[in-house]
Image (tube, grey):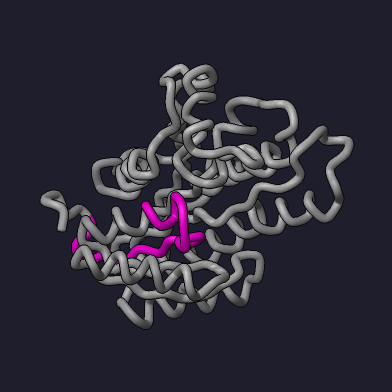
Amino acid sequence: MSRTARFTAKTALVTGAGSGLGRAIALALAAEGANVVVAGRGEGPLKETVALIEEQGGTGYAHAADVSRSEDVKALVRAAVERFGSLDVAVNNAGVFRGAGPIADVAEDDWQTLLDINVTGVLLSLQAEVAQMRGQEGGGAIVNISSNLGPHTRIPGTTAYGVSKAAVSALTRGAALDHIGDGVRINAVSPGASATTMSLLPGESEAERAVRMKEQSPLGRVSSAEEVAAAVLYLASEDAASVVGTDLVIDGGAAA
């Protein structure tokens, strides 16, 4: 258990928590005392995340949900509250990368998937979370996971994905103003290339990515999943009590 334990006795929900950044965020929240509900479409990976949480002495609960379905998300929030009594922190991390290539050549199905999961999924999650948080004592904090691609920088061949993440940034800022009066703080984190499979080019190894990032990143490397998680925990904690509607970029200077 962390010596700071900023989330003791709080309930945290993390979508897309079966792997990558979502798993790292869930582990970090649990390490600081939170009861963590991990969500995603596959039960197997979620149970693996819960096992890792329990190995470090934390408390986790897996609940399968498709964030593009409103009933799934409402049921997810209900399950979190029924199991742990409240919903204090929510991290909307679920997302996909589709439609690589020039925007004029992007398949309609890929475009729709990006919108359904990356944009509508965040909207539906946020709506269900706010509905719970604004009616409970103490409100809550929500962190949406956006990206440096779209809101902050552009790379040829990633326009469709960038559009979906720019929408997340705009949604975050607008929702933050809409709901701070309800006692719900909403912010975003925009990672750049991080140590997850999403940052690997097709057929690229981690060692090859490391060589590429020495040239492409001012920092000279990808961000670790733990570094991104640390930014999320800051925004979700009382350390950031006056931070509302920010979009914190964690990308080693790529968008500077």
Residue 14 occupies quadrant:
bottom left
Residue 246 higher or lower than 63, as above or below: above
| Quadrant of the rendering where the N terminus is positioned | bottom left
Span of residues in magenta = 7-24
Q: Give x and y (percent) for residue 195.
A: 45, 41
Viewer-closest of 80 and 48? 48
Q: Is residue 75 magenta?
A: no
Whether residue 73 is visible here, answered yes or no, is no
Image-based side of 20 in relation to 66, left or right? left
Q: Is residue 236 left or right of residue 15?
A: left
Q: Residue at x 33, y 44 (%)?
A: 226
Residue 200 image-quadrant placement: top right
- Whether residue 21 appears in magenta in the rendering, the answer is yes
Name the one closer to the observer, 170 or 60: 60
Please indicate whether residue 2 sits to the left or right of residue 143 in the image. left
Q: Position of residue 51 (x, y in %)?
A: 32, 71
Q: Is residue 211 above or below residue 163?
A: above
Residue at the outermost bottom position: 82
Residue drawn at point x = 54 percent, y = 42 percent? 146
Q: Is residue 82 visible?
A: yes
Q: Residue at x 19, y 67 (%)?
A: 57
117 vs 57, left or right, is right
Q: Position of residue 19 (x, y in %)?
A: 46, 58
